[in-house]
Image: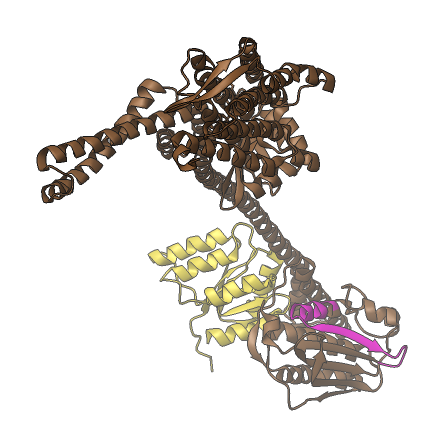
Chain colours: A yellow, B brown
Amino acid sequence: MKKIKSAPKKILWIEDERELIDVYKCTLKEAGNFSVEFMRLGQSAINRIKEIERGSAEKPDLIVLDILLPDISGDVVLEEIKKSPATKDIAVFVLTNYSGEHMQEKVRERLKTDRYLVKTEWGPNKLIPLLKKILK
Amino acid sequence: MCYNYSMDAQNILLIASAAINLGLWGLLFFRGRHKNTHLFFGFVAISAALWSGLTVGYRLPTDNILNWCRFVYAAAILVSLAFAYFSLMFPEAIKTNKFLLFLFSLPALAFIFLTISTNLVVADAFAADGSENKIIFGAWYVFYVLCFAGYFILSFVLLFINKRKLSGVARIRSEYILFGGFCVWIFAMLSNILLPLLDIFSLNWLGQVSGSLLIFLGTYAILIKRPMDSRTAAKKIIIYALYTVFVYGIFYFIIWLYIALFGGVYSSGAYLLGIITAPLFVMFFVWLNNKIKRITDRYLFPSLYSHQEAIAKLADELTNFIDLDKIVKSILKSIKETMQIEKAGILLVDRSSGVIKYEAPQTFGFNPDDLKFLMRGGFSTEYFSESSKVLIIDEIEPVDLEQNRELNQLSESMKLIGASLSIPMVIFGKLNGIIVLGEKVSGDPYTEEDINLLLTLSKQAAIAVYNAQLYREVQNFNKSLQQKIDQQTKEIKEAYEVEKQAHEELKKLDEAKNNFMLVTQHHLRTPLSVTRGYLDLLLKGVYGKIPKKVVEVLNIMEKSTRKEIDVVNDLLNVSPYQLGKAVIKIEDNISMIDILMKIVGDLKAEADKKNIYLKFEPSDDIPEILADKNQIKLALSNIVDNAIKYTKKGGVTVKISNEIFDTGEKELESVILIAVEDTGIGMSSEEQRAIFNKPFQRSKDIWKIDVVGKGIGLYISAQIIKAHRGKIWAESEGKNKGSAFFVQLPINKNSLKL
C-alpha cells in the first residue's frame, strides 16, 4: 500500500554559510516531504516578501532566518516580515550563532518570533523534530 | 542825709553795671581761672566794676566828693591798663619779661598815684544842686587823657593786628572785644573826659555803664564755644531794634487813638476796638516779620545765607538724584556755595569687603588721598562713629590734645591738609561717611549757625548717600546675578555638550561592543555548528553505511565538539562582563529555594555519574527577594557545578539560611546566606582570594582531575552576585579538606534599587 503523499511543506531558509546550507539541505532531504528554498542575502528575503505581497510568489509555511547576514541584519528582515500583512502570520524561526541578550529580547518580545535557536545547540538531529512539530 | 533821695536811675544803672561786671568776672573765674584770657579779662571786669562802684559813692551825697572823684578817675585809668594788658595776653600771652611789663604799666601806675594824691589831674570837685557834681581839672589832666586814650588805642592796634593773623573763633572773639572796647572808649572819652572839659557833667556816668557792654561782649565771646558771627549778631540786633520801634510806635498810637476817640483806655468802646485791633496787630506783625527779614537780607546783609533756603535747596536737589556720584557732588557743591568754602571733600565708608575702607569720590581743593590719609588707623572711624559730632580744629581743648595722642594726630593731619572741620554722616547709628571742609574764603570762622546748618545738611546727605548706596548695591547685585546666571548657563551648556559627546561616544562604544560580540559569537560558533551538523548527518547514515570503527571515532568527535561548544559558550558568557556590558534584570518575589531546588535537580545526574551525593538543605524562613532569576540561577549553578567537578569522594551540600548582620549602622541588615560545601580537593588561602577575581583562574591541581577547566564560571558567578549587591567568598581548611562557597544576598529591597 502506498502512502498518500500530502503536499510538501514549504520552508524559506535565509542562511549565508555554504556548508550549513549543505548540512540543512541534506537533513531536510532525509526528513522528506519538505520543499525548501535557501537565500543567502537579507535583501533577497525582503524582495521575496514584496513578491508574496503582490501575489507573484508563493507563501512559505515557515521561515528560518539567520541574524548575521552579508548584507543586512536578520532582525531587519524579520521586521519586514512582521510588517507585511501577507507574511506576518508565517511562523519564523531565528537560527543563528548570535546569542546577544539584547537581540534575543528584541526578536522574541517585539517581533514575536516562534523560536530563537542557537546553531551550536540545535544540530540537525535536534532541529528536524522541532520543524516537523511546527509544520504539522 | 537822705540816701533815698540820691538813689536815682543813674546810680541804679551804675550799681547794676558793677554787679554785672562782678558776676561776669565770677563766671570767667569759675570757668577757667588758669587760662590767660579768663584771668586778664577778669581784671578788666573787676576794674570796670570798681569804676562803676566808685562812681556810685561819688554821686551819693557825701562830705568828701573830691576824694571820691579822684578814686573814680584813678579807676578809669586802671580800666584802660587792664584792657591794654588783656590785649597783650589775647589770644596768647606775649613773650616778654616782667620788667618790660612793669615799664608798660608804669605810666598808668604813675597817673593813678598822681590822680589820687595830687591835684595835678583832679584839682577839685563839688556838688551842684539838681545836677551832676562838678569837677575842676588840674594842669596835667591833658596827659591823663593821653594816657587813658593811649592805652586804649594801643589795645585796639594790638587786637586789630592780632585779628588779621587769627582765624576761626579766635578771630570772632577779637572782633567782639574790639567792638566792646571801642564802645567803652568812645563813651568814656565823650561823657567822662571831653564833655566835662566843656563843663558838661550830666553824662559823667555813661562811660562806666557802657563798661558792662564790653565786659558782657567779651565774656560772651570768651566763654561761648562758637560765638555768633558778628554780622549775624548785628543783623539780629537791627531786626530786634526794628521790632521794638514798631511795637513801641503802635502802642502809643493806639493809646493816642483811644484817648482821642473814647477819652480813655478803660472804656467799653476801647475794649471792643481792642478785640478787633489785637488780631489785626498780630497778623500785621507776622507780615512785618517776614518783610523785615527779607529787607535786612536783601539790603543789609546780602551775603548772609538763609538756613531754610539752603536746606530746602539741597533737599530738593537730593530728591532728584539716585546716582551716588551726583548726590555727593550736589552735597559738596551746596555746602561750598552756601558757606563760601575754599576746600571741601567727602569720604564714603565702604563696608562691602567686611573691612571698613574709605573712598573719596568727590573733592574740591583737597587731594582725595589726603582725605583718606585722615582716616588711616582705626581711631578716626571710632571717634566719628562714637561722637557723631562735628570736629572743629579750633575748638579742640588743649587738654584733650595732650591726653589723647591719637586725637592730636588727627588734628595735626587735618591742619596739614588744610581741613578746618569734619562732619560725620551717621545713619542708623552707623558711620556712613565724613564731610571734610577747609576754611571759608573770607577766613571767617564757622559759627554756631554754620555748624547747625552743616549738621542738618549732613543728616540729609547721610540719608541720600545711604539710599544711593542701597540702590547701587541692588544694581550691582542684579548685575552680578545676571553674570552668575550667564556663567552657569554657559557651564550647563558646556556640561551638556560634554555629556552629549560622552553619551555619543558611549553609544558608539556600546555599538562597537555589540558588534564585537556579534562577530565573535559568529566566528567562534559557525565552524562548530558546521562540524556538529556534518557529524549528525554522518552518524545518522545520511552519507551511507559507516563501519563500526568509524562510528566510534565519529562519536568521540561529536563529544569533543560538544565540549568545545560548552567552552565557547562560557567564553561568550563572560565576555559581556569583561566588556562591562552585562546588566541584570531585577524581578520581584524571587524564591531562592525554588532556584536552588531546580539547580540541584538539574545537576543531580552529574553527581550521580560521579557517584557522589548532592544534598539541598532548605530552611523555612527564607523571604522572597529581588533578583534576576536567570542570572542568579546561572551564578549558583556555576558554583554547585564547580563543587561537583572538584569532588571525587563524598559529595556536595547546598544550604540556605536567613542571617542578621550588625553592620554597625542604625539598622541591622538581614541577608540570605547560601553555602555550597564540598568534600573535594580544597584550596589554599591564596586561591580562595583569587578564585573570583580572574576569569581564567583555576585550581592549581586541576590537572589531577578529569574535568574540563571551568575557571570562567566562578568569575561570572562573582560578577552576577556583585551586581545583586551581594557578596561571594570561599573558605577551605586547606588541601584535601574540602571547600565551602558562600553567597550572601540582601533582603532589604532598598539595597537593590538599581
Between residues B311 and B567, which one lies in front from this camera angle?
A: B311
Q: Position of residue B11 (x, y in %)?
A: 43, 31
Q: Is residue B208 magenta?
A: no
In-image side of B669 versus B549 (left or right): left
Between residues B701 and B133, which one lies in front from this camera angle?
A: B133
Image quadrant of residue B422?
Answer: top right
Residue span colored magenta: B715-738
In-image side of B604 versus A8 (left or right): right
Quarter containing the C terminus of chain B = bottom right
Residue under the point 73% across and 72% down: B559
In the rendered view, tell whether residue B240 sits above or below residue B687: above
Q: Please identify the residue farthest to the bottom as the structure is shown.
A: B620
Q: Position of residue B676 (x, y in %)?
A: 76, 81
Image quadrant of residue A9?
Answer: bottom left
In the rendered view, tell whether residue B103 sits above or below residue B546: above
Residue under the point 60% across and 66% down: A118
Q: So how many labels did they put on this image? A: 0
Q: Where is residue B302 in the image (x, y as percent from the top left)?
A: 36, 19
User: Would you say residue B434 is visible in this rendering?
Assistant: no
Between residues B482 and B256, which one lies in front from this camera angle?
A: B256
Q: Please identify the residue farthest to the right as the structure is shown.
A: B735
User: Would you say residue A30 is visible in this rendering?
Assistant: yes
Quarter containing the N terminus of chain B = top left
Between residues B147 and A135, which one lies in front from this camera angle?
A: B147
Q: Position of residue B601 (x, y in %)?
A: 67, 85
Image quadrant of residue B394?
Answer: top right
Q: Does the magenta stretch include residue B719?
A: yes
